[in-house]
Image (cartoon, helix red, strand yellow):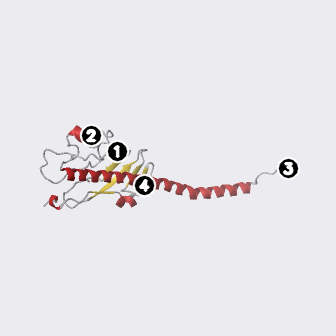
Amino acid sequence: MQKQGFTLVEIIIVLVLLAVLAMIAVPKYLNLIETAEIQAAKGTLAEVQSRLNMTFYDWLLTGTKVKQNTTENNPNFRKGTAVTTLLPSSCLQAHGGSVANYQYGLADEGTSSCSATGTGTIGGWKVNMQSGEFIHFCEGNKRSYKIQKLTSPTGKVIDFTTNASSGDTIGAQQYADEFILYTPECPAYMSPN
């Protein structure tokens, strides 16, 4: 009895079916990875927001500023984060609070070059503020500050100013409104005139 293999037509049909399945499954898989990265970035932003709140409330309760700049006599809490990345408090000690408008120590310790363009990270993520964005407490009415991009521990960049995705960059402009830091409300007596 002679064995028979698959015909050419049968093999082509199977290959076409596999190609169709791949066309459906691969984009969904890639989208799933991107969604996971966005969710992880949201977790990092939540940690930054928590540290920001704790910094403010600690100062409010104790009356001690995180870092006093010698030229600042205004009673308003005006400390600002770097326009590039958030830095750890060790940088404040190293530079006397003078680096890029004397940042809060929001980033993890020992992870920054302590320069104005340092690389402080929060949970392994590097957080970049939008250009020109400084976080201030009790100064004017502005309370929201946008994130430009976050870089994951693996080097994946999530850019909230673009929708384009290429290489190791995820364009995430559609999520920009979800990646905003807020400063707590200041007491009325601290509000500027």
Q: Give how far apart the Cα atoms at labels 2 and 3 are.
A: 80 Å
Q: Position of residue 49 (x, y in %)?
A: 31, 54
What secondary structure is found at the residue carrying circle 4? helix
The residue under the point 35% across, 54% down is: 46
Residue type marked 4: Gln
List the residue tagged with mark 2. Answer: 90
The residues tagged by marks 4 and 1 sit, at their Cα atoms, a distance apart of 17 Å
Q: Is residue 134 shown to the viewer in this render?
A: no
The tag on residue 121 is: 1
Look at the picture and state if 91 lies above or below 159.
above
Q: Amino acid at mark 1?
A: Thr
**Residue 2, numbered circle:** 3
The residue at 32%/53% (across/down) is 50
Q: Earlier in the sequence, mark 1 or mark 2?
A: 2
Q: Amino acid at mark 2?
A: Ser
Mark sitting earlier along the chain (2/3): 3
* Residue 133 x/y as whole percent: 26, 54
Q: Earlier in the sequence, mark 3 or mark 4?
A: 3
Q: Is residue 27 left or right of residue 96?
A: right
Q: Which numbered disc, 1 or 2, marks the residue closer to the eye?
A: 2
Of residues 158 and 66, the one nearer the viewer is: 66
Is the Cβ of the residue at disc 2 closer than 8 Å to that at disc 3?
A: no
Q: Quadrant of residue 38?
A: bottom left
Please state which of the two labelled residues, at mark 1 or mark 3, is closer to the viewer.
1
Q: Is 93 on the left-hand or right-hand side of 30?
A: left
